[in-house]
């Protein structure tokens, strides 16, 4: 089984089309904003550009508002408290890596994406982006094998170490590499708490309560509460590599089902995404 199997090769269930649409919308936003970034733009300005672009296209609610990280903040250098994830006045400079991360809700469907780029040439950053492909393949393969989330997490971390990198998704709350996403009830007004939409948070909390009762968690972490096989549903997966002051990641939806057919039991929602296209283009060029 390859890491490239996705819903492109699968009969798209109607309920998945909405998730694919919002994920593509979010990645289109990331590519559009990345193309507008110039030296001197701040993280706050880049985050605002994402918000404006998506609102102009009908987004009214969020799992979380857009983030932007520049320079060594792409590797979460020195991050110790959650407030450090919020955009700052750090300015983009030539050769500097950046990450754009957004989680819009559109027509009641949620996506959470991460886009890594660089302002100009940066061979180290290119190497990190290329090395992420092996993580996409490993995660899909081991989810299909129904290994526990905790075990897969540890295997991803071992691969990062073998590649010479640090695991930077450990800096997230609970060290998560992924979390479940779901439909969100549309409301005329949806308040936010610390940048997170309350409707989406209610869904995650509900999953956590049901999961606690049934022995699973909507958070994919290195801890005991993730020591269970993958739960059917949609997971926003984000392996994040770091090397000194440079970080890179992707984030996209992995579909997990209860099918006994390995190819149907888990697949990436979409292969027509920037990082997947990049890997394919590099293979053709080689």
Image: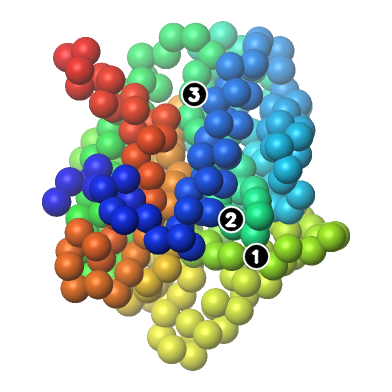
Q: Could you say which disc has been placed on residue 110 in the image?
A: 2
Residue 235: where, in percent of width, then height?
44, 60
Which residue is the site of mark 1? 184
From the viewer's perspective, is the residue at label 3 or at label 1 nearer?
1
Q: Secondary structure at mark 1?
A: loop
Residues packed near mark 3 inside 10 Å, few (<14), some (14 to 19) or many (20 plus): many
From the viewer's perspective, is the residue at label 3 or at label 2 nearer?
2
| Image quarter of residue 133 | top left
Q: CA distance from mark 3 to mark 1?
A: 30 Å
- Residue 279 is left or right of residue 46, and the answer is left
List the single residue furthest toward the bottom.
213
Q: Earlier in the sequence, mark 3 or mark 1?
A: 3
Tag 3–tag 1 contact (CB < 8 Å): no
Q: Secondary structure at mark 2?
A: strand
The residue located at (59%, 57%) in the rendering is 109
- Residue 24 is left or right of residue 144, and the answer is right
Which residue is the site of mark 3? 117
Q: Could you say which disc has been placed on residue 205 in the image?
A: none
């Amino acid at each position: 089984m390859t890491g490239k199997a996705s819903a492109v090769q699968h009969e798209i269930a109607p309920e998945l089309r909405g998730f694919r649409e919002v994920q593509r919308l979010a990645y289109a936003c990331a590519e559009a904003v990345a193309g507008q970034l110039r030296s001197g733009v701040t993280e706050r300005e880049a985050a605002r550009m994402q918000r404006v672009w998506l609102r102009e296209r009908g987004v009214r609610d969020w799992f979380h508002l857009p983030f932007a990280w520049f320079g060594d903040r792409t590797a979460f250098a020195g991050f110790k408290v959650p407030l450090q994830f919020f955009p700052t006045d750090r300015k983009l400079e030539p050769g500097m890596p950046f990450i754009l991360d957004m989680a819009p809700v559109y027509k009641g469907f949620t996506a959470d994406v991460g886009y890594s780029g660089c302002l100009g040439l940066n061979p180290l950053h290119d190497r990190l982006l290329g090395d992420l492909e092996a993580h996409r393949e490993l995660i899909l393969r081991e989810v299909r094998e129904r290994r526990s989330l905790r075990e897969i997490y540890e295997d991803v971390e071992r691969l990062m170490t073998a590649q010479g990198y640090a695991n930077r998704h450990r800096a997230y709350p609970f060290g998560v590499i992924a979390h479940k996403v779901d439909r969100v009830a549309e409301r005329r007004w949806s308040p936010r708490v610390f940048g997170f939409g309350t409707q989406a948070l209610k869904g995650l909390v509900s999953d956590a309560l049901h999961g606690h009762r049934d022995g699973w968690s909507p958070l994919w972490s290195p801890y005991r509460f993730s020591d269970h096989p993958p739960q059917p549903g949609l997971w926003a997966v984000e392996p994040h590599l770091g090397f000194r002051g440079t970080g890179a990641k992707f984030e996209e939806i992995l579909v997990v089902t209860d099918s006994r057919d390995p190819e149907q039991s888990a697949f990436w929602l979409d292969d027509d995404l920037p990082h997947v296209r990049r890997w394919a283009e590099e293979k053709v060029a080689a």
